[in-house]
Image (spheres, rainbow, N blue to C red):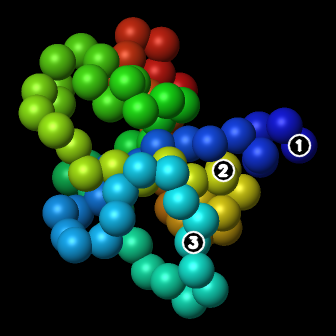
Amino acid sequence: QELLRAELTVLTAPSDAPTGKRLLEAGETLQLVTFPDGTIPIFSAPQRVFDGGQVRTEAHALQLEARALLETTRGAQLVLNPFSEYRK
């Protein structure tokens, strides 16, 4: 239950949409960044995006409640903190 209320960070395609912490509107779609194999990187904190030096410049990112993110990406393969030593 606690995990579902936690905030997770996702990378999004550059757009005019606001970044940072927000709630998804009903019916809203997101253009999430995916890896070549189709997995979606998610992060336990915004600073985890920059682990390992894979991302060196500003990133377009959103912080979403885990429950909303998991519902939005239902059926997709996710990887937590993919650039960290301790990825899941």
**Label 3 Cα crowd, 10 Å radius (few <14 / some 14-19 / many 20+):** some
Q: Position of residue 15 (x, y in %)?
A: 20, 70
Q: What label does residue 66 carry, if any? A: 2
Q: What label does residue 85 carry, if any? A: none
Q: Position of residue 46 (x, y in %)?
A: 41, 32
Q: Which residue is mark 1?
A: 1
Q: Is residue 27 left or right of residue 33?
A: right
**Label 1 Cα crowd, 10 Å radius (few <14 / some 14-19 / many 20+):** few
Q: Position of residue 31 (x, y in %)?
A: 32, 70
Q: Nearer the viewer, residue 42 or 26?
A: 26
Give the amino acid type for the residue marked by disc 1 in the picture.
Gln
Q: Residue at x 50, y 83 (%)?
A: 28
Q: Which residue is mark 3?
A: 24
Q: Nearer the viewer, mark 2 or mark 3?
A: 3
Q: Is residue 64 above or below residue 59?
A: below
Does the image show residue 17? yes
Q: Residue at x 32, y 31 (%)?
A: 49
Location of the N terminus (image quadrant): top right
Give the amino acid type for the residue marked by disc 3 in the picture.
Leu
Q: Quadrant of residue 52?
A: top left
